Amino acid sequence: MTADHTYFYNHSLLDTATAWYQQGGRILLIDEVHKYARWSRELKNIYDGLPEMQVIFSASSALDIFRGEADLSRRVIQYNLPGLSLREYIKFSGGPLFEPLTIDDIRENHVHLTFQMLNQWQPLPVFEKYLKYGYLPIIADGESDYLQRLEQVINAIVDTDLAYIASYNAGTAQKVKRLLSVIAESAPFKPNISALASKLDIVRDRIYEYIHQLKDAKLLNILTVEGKGASRLQKPEKLYLENTNLAFAMNPHPDRGNLRETFLLNQLLNSGATVWAPKSGDFKVGDVTIEVGGRGKSGEQVANAGDYMIAADDLETGFGNKIPLWLFGFLS
């Protein structure tokens, strides 16, 4: 059942779970639980009062399930479901199934790995499709209206999900959309919070708040400098759209360099890596600095960074420290 169904106008989750339990039900599935006003308290009551009932619920990624009015921290196992990695998209669209790789696999064996893969598929055409259409499973319905449906997803997140979770009204939702649009125009975006506040007629603290809500809702990724943490009042080093498909949905001709960085950061974060903004180069993972660019990209900018890799676009296979950008899509 979905928690925004009209059934719940006159029925509670707890009453529903109890009735189902009395009929022999032991598994309860609830979709979009954040759209039910008393969700956390009633879930707690279900967990405590019906211990044999297994409850599986979904919610917007913007919802912090451990900050509801009732404590669920000892009762809930939380799973975050990111979009498809390039590796998953290949299989999802009927291609071969490859095993996920680690950063060390890519760093040490990328030449061997890419030659093996080239016997089974051509990476560059598939990579181009993935950047535009491949991140969400709605691609199963076809490419022709994928970006239009993705626009609808963006609107639903801001107008509906964040409206429930962060108590947005119509005016707030419009301001948040304008903020997202400004960021999308030039992401990766090094924010000037004062300029944003002035341009959008929003106080500074609200800008920070909206940025982090968009991050929680999986519309943005935030990059910070190592050691500075990620406080909600900490100025981000850079802001990125969460995935490259969003760039095409919000701009018919996104910048190629921006797409490269957006793709790499997305794949690194979704693999569980901790990523920082380095002093030189684009990203730092552990002790390794990664510079992103086209096939002709050199290591000049990161030559003094110590251990580094170059993630190069438009390459089927690499050499030395230069690694095909698409290969990082196999991290998860």
Image (cartoon, rainbow, N blue to C red):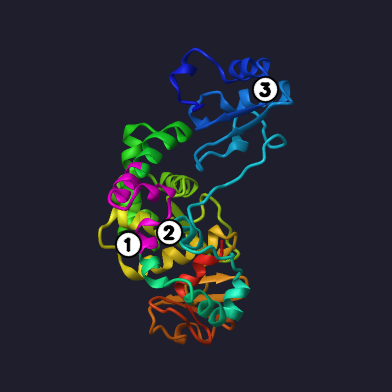
Q: Relative to 82, is 312 on the left or the right?
A: left
Tell me if residue 195 can be seen: no
Q: Position of residue 247 (x, y in %)?
A: 34, 57
Q: Amino acid at mark 1?
A: Ser
Q: Secondary structure at mark 3?
A: helix
Tell me if residue 116 can be seen: yes
- Mark 2 / mark 3, whichever is N-terminal: 3
Give the dominant element type of the magenta stretch: helix, strand or loop. helix
Above or below for 202 versus 51:
below
Label 2 crowd (10 A; few <14 / some 14-19 / many >=20): many
Q: Nearer the viewer, mark 2 or mark 3?
A: 3
Residue position marked by numbered label 3 in the rendering: 45
Residue segment shown in magenta: 129-152
Q: Are marks 2 and 1 in contact (CB under 8 Å)?
A: no
The furthest residue to the left: 252
Q: Secondary structure at mark 2?
A: strand
Q: CA distance from mark 2 to mark 3?
A: 40 Å
Above or below for 185 versus 110:
above
Q: Position of residue 259 (x, y in %)?
A: 37, 65
